[in-house]
Amino acid sequence: MARTMAQDGRRSWRKTALSTIVGGLVGAGAMAAMLSLAGTALLDAMGPSRVALAAVGLIYLLIAAMVGFGVAAPRAGAKVLNVADAEELRDDRANLLFSTIVMALLGATLLLLALARGPGFAAGVVSAGVAFATLALMLAGGALASWLWRDRFDELGRQLGLEGASWSFYVSWIVLTVWGAADFLGLGATLTAIDAVTVSAAALLLGSFVAIGRRGMMVR
């Protein structure tokens, strides 16, 4: 029995390692492609804050792409995603598809914000009004869809959502409070409005991973 448990544990860790490697390679490739397409001039004009926001948006899009791949091809997706088997992907297809769409829309909106024209960034590809309207529609639509979809998730899913939201708040509150205080006191880098958006979006992802990890669901 102990040998069986040890073998299962090794298989779980190998799968987690494979998922991490694949995700890292895909992320590195996507980032290299984005840098190549953007060009040095645009990246210099964007500045660190906009580049950081674009990077977070790209991470959301990559996660959406990987989960979407698992939904479209459960057998292949089960080998790289953190699921027990292909059947789990098939059984939870509707919820995963909903999550994929939300993640993709959020990632695209963050990228749009990062590339929108604004004070000090005339090279933006879209106007500030378009970017803000897109953000408002995405938030309103996401909130409405989440409310309408709430009964489709089981008790564990709802609990993970609440725990992830709590951890996201803790992380963003600590980071923004410390960063804001350091800026106010002249002790650190300037905290801009776009930095607050980036931290909040990144904390949302980090909080979800913390909630999942605390329940031992990162390795399966």
Image (spheres, rainbow, N blue to C red):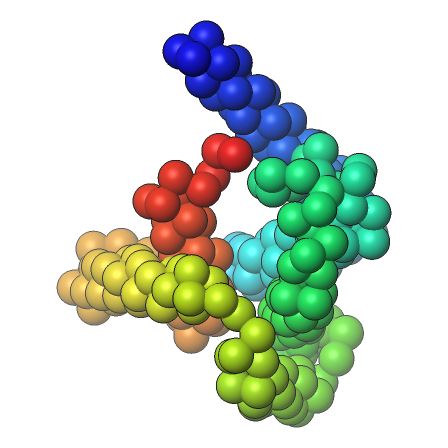
State left or right for residue 176 relative to residue 184. Answer: right
Query: Hey, which quadrant is residue 92 in on the image?
Result: bottom right
In the displayed orientation, state which residue is furthest to the top: 3
Q: Residue at x 37, y 52 (%)?
A: 211
In the displayed orientation, state which residue is furthest to the left: 185
Residue 132, percent from left and from top: 61, 87
Q: Please count the marks in the image.
A: 0
Q: Is residue 105 above or below residue 157?
A: below
Q: Is residue 30 above or below residue 65?
A: above
Residue 192, percent from left and from top: 40, 70
Query: Hey, which quadrant is residue 181 in on the image?
Result: bottom left
Q: Is residue 131 above or below residue 201?
A: below
- Residue 90 seen in the figure: yes
State left or right for residue 179 relative to residue 158. Answer: left
- Residue 121 seen in the figure: no
Q: Residue at x 79, y 40 (%)?
A: 75
Q: Quadrant of the N terminus?
A: top left
Q: Residue at x 78, y 46 (%)?
A: 74
In the displayed orientation, state which residue is furthest to the front: 1
Q: Nearer the viewer, residue 145 or 51?
A: 145
Q: Nearer the viewer, residue 182 or 197?
A: 197
Residue 111, percent from left and from top: 66, 66
State left or right for residue 209 relative to residue 101. Answer: left
Residue 82, percent from left and from top: 59, 40
Q: Residue at x 56, y 30 (%)?
A: 16
